[in-house]
Amino acid sequence: MAWRQLIFKTRTISISPQPYQTPGFSKFFSKSSLYVEKVGIPEFLNGIGKGVEAHVAKLETEIGDFQKLLVIRTLKLKKLGIPCQQRKLILKHAHKYRLGLWRPRAQPLKS
């Protein structure tokens, strides 16, 4: 039984040396980048949205550097007078940005 499962698994996995050789496939990736190239505090907070962008001036004067914003603690944000829900959003998106899972978009989506 185990041999049979092993054989079927190896048959279904096929790795092609050049995966994107399908004609017309590359046209989906020819668009310019949808994300902001240079990210600062204003672009980061505008990318989060949900009212967080109201604190751009406060965070720029107090923190000043985007790298410091990525490692800021919740107590520091609380001392700056940022509400709880917005602190959570800033910290959550900062963590995702550090891991490379999220980037602010160049233009906000219009719904």
Image (spheres, grey):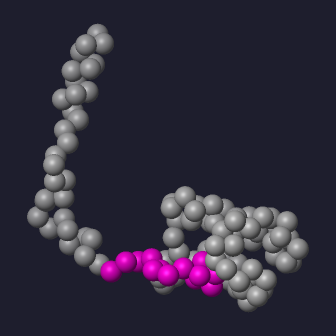
What residue is at 25 percent from the left and 76 percent from the top? 30
- Is there any visible trace of residue 67 in the rendered image? yes
Write down the region rendered in magenta.
32-45
Q: Position of residue 83 (x, y in %)?
A: 82, 73
As rendered, which of 75 and 26 lies closer to the eye? 75
- The vertical placement of 46 against 89, above or below, is below
As rendered, which of 5 and 67 lies closer to the eye? 67
Image quarter of residue 63: bottom right
Split into 4 quadrants, where in the image is the N terminus? top left
What residue is at 26 percent from the left and 20 percent from the top? 6
Q: Across the whole image, how many numbered discs are drawn on residues?
A: 0
- Is there any visible trace of residue 89 in the rendered image? no
- The vertical placement of 55 against 104, above or below, is below
Q: Does the stretch in magenta take in 111?
A: no
- The vertical placement of 31 against 102, above or below, is below
Q: Position of residue 97 (x, y in %)?
A: 56, 65
**Horizontal side of residue 53 vs 29, given as left or right:** right
Image quarter of residue 61: bottom right
Q: Position of residue 89 (x, y in %)?
A: 69, 67
Q: Does the stretch in magenta take in 40?
A: yes
Q: Position of residue 58 (x, y in %)?
A: 78, 86
Q: Main secondary structure of the magenta part?
A: loop
